Amino acid sequence: MENKPERLLSLDFFRGLTVAAMILVNNPGSWSNIYAPLEHAEWNGCTPTDLVFPFFLFIVGVSIAYALGSKKLDSASHNKTILKALKRGLILFGLGFILAIFPRNFATYDFVETIKTVRIPGVLQRIAVVFFIAAVIFLKSSEKTIFRTIIVILLGYWILMMFVPVPGFGDANLEKETNLGAWLDRTILTEAHLWKSAKTWDPEGILSTLPAIATALFGVLVGVYLKRKDVDAANKIAWLFSVGTLATLAGLLWDLHFPINKALWTSSYVLYTGGLATIILALSYWIIDVNKYNGFTKPFVIYGVNAITVFFVSGLMPRLVNMIKVELPDGKEIGALSWIYQTCFVPYFSPINASLAYAITFIMFFFVILWFMYKKNIIIKV
């Protein structure tokens, strides 16, 4: 196994599983009917859904260690590699921006007005920024420096959020609208360019991107360790399980003072989710790469090889399809996708199961497309 080209099937599996989970939680039939584990925590706390995004950033970090490992050894190629990383980051940011400005109705679309109120932060935008910064840090830093960087980020963010007074509001706090991160987003981006559901704060804001970088760097260190040739598989698994468990427990302990919170991406949240991601990857590595029980991995690998593509298209497609209007018997018009949900799912399931069945069907629909692309070896790299 160690002599084969450096590629972890377990990492591809974990990536595909995470992206499929992203699509599942982002596309319910009805946002009013969702099982509790498929919803984000109201504020503090962590549901299974709150694990999805940090898991993906963790995987980005592990992938950086594998993809750029040989480039790190060649210092002469660093500038070229950084430019490529910057290009990729800009493309990812651009894709996120396209999703933000894409019209839900061409008939009433006003590009100028949209730009005035478009949301600037977002999931793909955060992935772009985190990927680029983590890639540069990996190329230019030793493992010890990366570890120290994580510590500095987590402690620095804790100090900023817990002890720095918030201009106009007084003492430091972790409330939705009055914490330091929310104030910074409103000051720099203005309310017009924040998350429309809140307007006064953004879950992918500027300040909370700092600890998100630490999440990716956590993955970088795990990737570096998994690549080591001087450590056998048994020791790798033992150490990763140990580190993952300790990080998870540390996150839970820190939660008593600095609550686990996805929207704020608190330092306790970084440790908790990074620990769990390490445990899951170690378990996957043991089952799939070491013991070769990999028959169940193909559907998730198929999802993983075009991860960004399917995430982007799954956000774009519902808007396109819903531009096709269907007239109901009462004369009202609804989007075609909404009509499919109302016609094919609502009459046959309870409201909450209809919503879940629709989301699962959404995943299966894209799986068919991705399976065809996989068979034809079509991989769209961003």
Image (tube, rainbow, N blue to C red):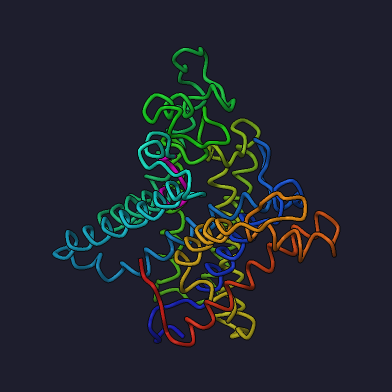
Q: Position of residue 101 (x, y in %)?
A: 42, 46
Q: Is residue 104 above or below residue 380?
A: above
Number of labels in the image equals 0
Side (left or right) of 354 relative to 334: right
Q: Residue at x 47, y 34 (%)?
A: 194
Q: Is residue 121 magenta?
A: yes
Residue at 42%, 85% (x, y): give it: 377
Query: Is residue 326 left or right of 3 when viewed as pictured?
Result: right
Q: Quadrant of residue 337?
A: bottom right
Q: Position of residue 129 (x, y in %)?
A: 36, 49
Residue 126 within the magenta-colored segment of the rendering: no
Out of 30 and 163, give the one closest to the viewer.
30
Q: Position of residue 70 (x, y in %)?
A: 27, 71
Question: In percent of the image, x 47 and y 29: which residue is there?
Answer: 181
**Left or right placement of residue 60 versus residue 74 in this view:** right
Q: Is residue 349 visible?
A: yes
Give the image quarter of residue 41. Answer: top right
- Residue 217 seen from this side: no
Residue 190 image point, x, y percent: 41, 27
Residue at 32% over, 50% down: 133
Q: Nearer the viewer, residue 302 or 13?
A: 302
**Horizontal arrangement in the rendering, residue 98 relative to residue 275 (left or right):** left
Asked if 54 appears above or below 207 in the picture, the reply is: below
Q: Which residues are magenta?
A: 119-125
Q: Is residue 255 above or below residue 302?
A: above
Q: In the image shown, does 333 or 264 lie closer to the viewer?
A: 333
